[in-house]
Image (cartoon, helix red, strand yellow):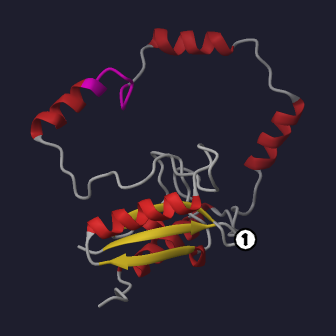
């Protein structure tokens, strides 16, 4: 397996996030921690390592060097000092069952009862959105292009109102990055 340390850079060239990964980790958003990669792939710097331990050590070194915003020691958005996480971890069958049981009844994929829907509607009854908010909502619905300038035509919009062209571009970027040769070999 191929491991690397990566830096996500601001437009001025300073890093805002440092991590360790393999495969396409450096080129995907981290939704669990709400860390988002730069839109420009040129602002993602990757250093390949022969093993995971070296990659973890270098990640910790870089985080210590640049410092963390939450501790007031630097410019990084990282929430830990690095070196944590397990690559390729697989849950046991027992752990999967426990997780499944703990998530049941939390509304994940379940239909809401009529009482629940009525209660939710009742809490919103009487609230009015400001004129500014209504105008923003109206403008957004009338958009003719996506945030990158692609046309929002019926054949270029997904079921979730996303841009098919943007999805295709991101897919191609990830595909290219996953086959990029290791410079250390």
Q: Where is residue 8 in the image (x, y as percent from the top left)?
A: 56, 66
Relative to residue 75, is residue 25 drawn left or right? left
Please say whether residue 104 is one of the residues in the magenta stretch: yes
**Which residues are the magenta region?**
102-110
Which residue: 31% across, 69% down? 54
Which residue: 64% across, 56% down? 75
Q: How many marks?
A: 1
Q: Which of 40 and 8 is in front in this view?
A: 8
For the N terminus, give its image quadrant: bottom left
For the C terminus, give its image quadrant: bottom left
Q: Is residue 98 above or below residue 53?
A: above
The quadrant holding residue 113 is top left
Q: Position of residue 148 (x, y in %)?
A: 69, 67
Q: Is mark 1 on a helix, strand or loop?
A: loop
Q: Which residue matches tag 1?
A: 12
Please say whether residue 95 is one of the residues in the magenta stretch: no
Q: Position of residue 128 (x, y in %)?
A: 80, 20
Q: Which of 46 and 65 is in front in this view?
A: 65
- Give the main secondary structure of the magenta stretch: loop
């Amino acid at each position: 397996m191929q491991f690397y340390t990566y830096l996500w850079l601001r437009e001025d060239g300073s890093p805002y996030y440092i991590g360790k990964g393999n495969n396409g980790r450096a080129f995907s958003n981290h939704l669990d921690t709400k860390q988002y990669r730069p839109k420009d792939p040129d602002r993602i710097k990757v250093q390949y390592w022969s093993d995971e331990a070296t990659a973890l050590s270098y990640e910790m070194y870089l985080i210590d060097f640049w410092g963390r915003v939450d501790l007031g020691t630097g410019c990084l958005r990282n929430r830990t000092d690095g070196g944590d996480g397990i690559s390729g971890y697989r849950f046991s069958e027992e752990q999967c069952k426990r997780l499944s049981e703990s998530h049941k009844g939390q509304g994940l994929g379940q239909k809401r009862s009529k009482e629940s829907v009525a209660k939710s509607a009742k809490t919103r009854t009487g609230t009015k959105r400001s004129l500014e908010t209504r105008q923003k909502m109206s403008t957004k619905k009338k958009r003719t292009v996506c945030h990158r300038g692609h046309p929002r035509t019926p054949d270029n919009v997904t079921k979730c109102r996303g841009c098919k062209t943007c999805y295709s571009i991101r897919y191609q970027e990830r595909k290219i990055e996953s086959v990029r040769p290791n410079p250390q070999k």
